[in-house]
Image (cartoon, helix red, strand yellow):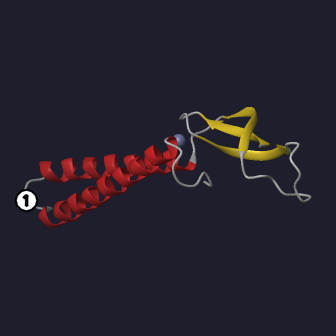
Amino acid sequence: MCFFDQHRFVCGDWKWGHFRQHCNREYRLGETCGMKLIMQTVPVGKKCKLCENIDVKMRRRAAEVERVNRWQREGNKFQASIKKSMEGVKNLDAEIYELGCERNRRLQGIGSQEW
Ligand SMILES: [Zn+2]
């Protein structure tokens, strides 16, 4: 079991940081045994990539919805634009949902921690 830093993001997610220390099992030079233990936790003053990505998409979605609301107040003039925008919102919803699932998988420790 080799020791690594743990980087903890403000959103509660974390990732492995720098390698710190080999355990006392015999390994070839520069190789870790593959079992990771936490040496120290380093707070990171921002959200992880995944959560930042979700935030970006949420903002884009909100802007899209706002646009649709504005167009709808104009009556029938922007039907085509509204339809297109609604499609965009639907796509964003799907992407946000996917990212949320991805985050859950990571919180459960399944899959890779390389992000
Ligand atoms: Zn996160």
The amino acid type, in three-letter code, at marker 1 is Asn
Residue drawn where x is 79% and y is 46% of the image: 18
In which image quadrant can residue 87 be found?
Answer: bottom left
Quarter in which the N terminus is drawn: top right
Residue drawn where x is 62% and y is 55% of the image: 114
Residue drawn where x is 44% and y is 44% of the image: 104
Q: Position of residue 22 (x, y in %)?
A: 86, 45
Residue drawn where x is 53% and y is 35% of the image: 11
Q: How many marks?
A: 1
- Nearest the camera: 76 or 9? 9
Residue 55 appears anywhere in the view:
no
Local crowd size for mark 1, using a 10 Å CA cut-off: few (<14), some (14–19), many (≥20) = few
Q: Examine the rendered structure and indicate whether residue 83 appears above or below residue 46.
A: below
Quarter in which the C terminus is drawn: bottom right
Q: Position of residue 82 (x, y in %)?
A: 18, 60
Q: Secondary structure at mark 1?
A: loop
Side of 38 relative to 107 (left or right): right
Residue farthest to the left, as pictured: 76
In which image quadrant can residue 89 be found?
Answer: bottom left
Q: Position of residue 113 (x, y in %)?
A: 60, 51
Q: Position of residue 33 (x, y in %)?
A: 78, 52
Residue beneath disc 1: 76
- Nearest the camera: 20 or 28? 28
